[in-house]
Structures are given as C-alpha cells and as structure tokens.
Image (cartoon, helix red, strand yellow):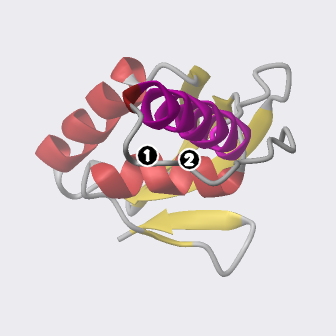
C-alpha cells in the first residue's frame, strides 16, 4: 500500500478538506484492492460430496455452480446410491470459494480432502 502522508487539515479551508478526503479515498481503495485481489491463473481443484437423495438440492447446487463466475468447470466425478462426488475447478482460493458459497447459504464440512455439502 502506498505510504501517503496525511497532513494536519485546517477545517477552515475547503480545498484542504477536499484534498484530505481524496487522499483517504486513495488509501482505502488501494487497501480494498489488495484484500480482494484474485489470481485467476490459479486453478483450485475441489472434490465435494452431495447427498443425492434430494434432487432439488442437487439441481439448485448445480445452478449455483453454473452461475458462479470464478468456477472454471464442474462435473460429477462419480456417484453411488448415497452421494454424488463433484469435481470443481475454481479460479481462486478455498477461503474465497467458501465465502461465495456461504453468501448463497451453502456450508461445507471441510475436515477432509473430500468436502461434504451440509
């Protein structure tokens, strides 16, 4: 982040106040950009298990995956009478994937390499 030095501002001068606000805006925007930087060249491979007894849950989950910008690809890797195992290629970090899914009311058990949709 830039090391902008903010000087004391005389509140009697409108131009000094405006310059101070402009400098603060630059500082906050730079900080926000650093915190929200996404490296789309990274392709994270996730394996997620979804209970297959609820077809509407599966359909909704697949629609969310299809509509999420940073998901490069997803497919069913394997399935049995209890679960579908999805392979998801995500252009971002695991934490960012979890945040996106949490915003859409999806939570996962991430204790193992195979994450389980709750």
Q: Secondary structure at mark 2?
A: helix
Answer few, some or many: residues within 10 Å of disc 2's Cα (few below 14, many 20 plus, some between 14 and 19): some
Extreme-left residue of the structure:
56
Q: Secondary structure at mark 1?
A: helix
Could you tell me residue 61's position as x and y percent?
30, 40
User: Residue at coordinates 63% horizontally, 57% vertically from top-left?
Assistant: 95
Residue 27 counted in the magenta span? yes
Q: Is residue 11 above or below residue 115?
A: above
User: Residue at coordinates 48% horizontally, 19% vertically from top-left?
Assistant: 69
State which region is magenta.
Answer: 15-36
Left or right: 57 with respect to 67?
left
Residue 21 counted in the magenta span? yes
User: Could you tell me which quadrant the C terminus lies in?
Assistant: bottom left
Q: Which mark is residue 97?
A: 2
User: Residue at coordinates 39% horizontally, 63% vertically from top-left?
Assistant: 82
Extreme-front residue of the structure:
12
Could you tell me residue 113's position as x and y percent?
75, 66
In depth, the one of 45 and 86 nearer the eye is: 45
Left or right: 105 with respect to 56?
right
| Marks 1 and 2 in Cβ contact (< 8 Å) | yes
Left or right: 106 with respect to 110?
left
In depth, the one of 19 and 63 nearer the eye is: 19
Q: Which residue is mark 1?
A: 100
């Amino acid at each position: 982040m830039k090391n902008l030095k903010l000087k004391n501002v005389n509140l009697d001068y409108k131009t000094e106040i405006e310059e101070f606000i402009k400098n603060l805006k630059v500082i906050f925007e730079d900080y926000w950009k650093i915190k929200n930087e996404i490296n789309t060249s990274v392709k994270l491979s996730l394996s997620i298990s979804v209970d297959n007894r609820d077809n509407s849950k599966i359909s909704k989950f697949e629609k969310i995956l299809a509509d999420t910008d940073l998901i490069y690809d997803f497919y069913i890797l394997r399935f049995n009478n209890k679960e579908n195992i999805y392979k998801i290629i995500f252009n971002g970090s695991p934490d960012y994937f979890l945040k996106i899914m949490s915003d859409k009311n999806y939570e996962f058990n991430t204790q193992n390499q195979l994450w389980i949709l709750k």
